[in-house]
Image (tube, rainbow, N blue to C red):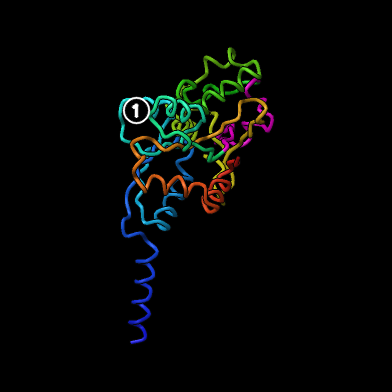
């Protein structure tokens, strides 16, 4: 009897803690944030009962899809310009945007010793392919081009550039050996509890514009409590701890 009562109490507690009207939210998430979002999504569902459906990719492509009527309800961009643009166009809710993470750029190779801690390898050569995300659609790709221009190497390395659709694909090019090195998001190689494999240069922030990653509530999710709950959860201390554990800065 005591055991049955204990089980009933646990079931009642669980029922109370999870909303009866648990819903679903569709989120478009910048490719660099896919790893952290997987962990945050699990915690979000456990805390609220809401289901999270995530699509990850390049911010520029998401903008085009949203403009074309894609039913995303929340956007986690890799920049702050896209959310502001969507608000100005009436495709996102004014006042809902905020910075959820400050991104960091890294030059990375799976080969130990190839990339030095000053990024001098870019000028010395010794590699055939340098992967970057498409600078026209991916903010991390634009940041990579800023670094190359700041080092006055854009022309010299141009024949070696391998342009990826997103920062996730740029990472894959390097991880699979199709490019000896590449510019990636620091969060992709600095996963919690794991050392960085290979060699890397954490690019000084002075060489590229601050990568402020903003989230925004899209018009499609304006009346969806689950969408509002997701944005609120991103501001929680639990979510912030996860974000920092992946090497991001916070505003």
Residue 117 place in picture, x, y as percent: 68, 33
Q: Residue at x 35, y 29 (%)?
A: 66
Residue 93 is covered by the magenta coloring: no
Residue 93 place in picture, x, y as percent: 42, 35
Q: Residue at x 48, y 28 (%)?
A: 84
Q: Residue at x 39, y 35 (%)?
A: 218
Residue 244 place in picture, x, y as percent: 58, 46
Residue 182 place in picture, x, y as percent: 54, 28
Boundaries of the magenta span: 102-123
Residue 105 seen in this snapshot: yes
Q: Nearer the viewer, residue 122 or 219?
A: 219
Badge 1 marks a residue whose secondary structure is helix
Q: Nearer the viewer, residue 160 or 58?
A: 58
Residue 118 is covered by the magenta coloring: yes
Look at the picture and state if 207 lies above or below 224: above
The quadrant of the picture occupied by the C terminus is: top right
Q: Residues within 10 Å of mark 1 (few under 14, many from 20)?
A: few
Which residue is denoted by mark 1 in the rendering? Answer: 65
Look at the picture and state if 46 lies above or below 172: below
The quadrant of the picture occupied by the N terminus is: bottom left
């Amino acid at each position: 009897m005591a055991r049955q009562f204990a089980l009933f109490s646990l079931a009642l507690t669980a029922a109370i803690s999870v909303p009866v009207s648990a819903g679903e939210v569709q989120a478009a998430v910048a490719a660099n944030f896919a790893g952290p979002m997987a962990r945050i999504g699990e915690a979000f569902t456990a805390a609220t009962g809401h289901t999270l459906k995530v699509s990850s990719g390049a911010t520029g492509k998401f903008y085009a899809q949203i403009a074309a009527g894609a039913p995303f309800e929340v956007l986690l961009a890799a920049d702050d310009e896209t959310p502001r643009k969507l608000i100005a166009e009436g495709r996102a809710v004014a006042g809902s945007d905020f910075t959820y993470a400050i991104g960091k750029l890294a030059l990375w190779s799976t080969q130990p010793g190839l990339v030095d801690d000053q990024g001098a390898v870019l000028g010395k050569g010794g590699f055939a392919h340098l992967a970057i995300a498409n600078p026209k659609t991916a903010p991390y790709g634009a940041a990579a081009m800023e670094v190359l221009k700041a080092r006055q190497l854009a022309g010299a390395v141009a024949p070696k550039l391998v342009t990826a659709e997103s920062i996730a694909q740029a990472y894959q090019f390097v991880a699979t050996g199709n490019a000896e090195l590449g510019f990636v998001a620091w969060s992709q190689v600095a996963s919690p509890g794991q050392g960085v494999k290979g060699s890397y240069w954490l690019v000084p922030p002075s060489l590229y514009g601050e990568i402020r990653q903003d989230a925004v509530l899209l018009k499609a999710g304006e009346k969806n409590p689950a969408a509002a709950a997701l944005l609120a959860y991103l501001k929680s201390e639990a979510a912030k701890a996860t974000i920092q554990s992946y090497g991001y800065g916070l505003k």
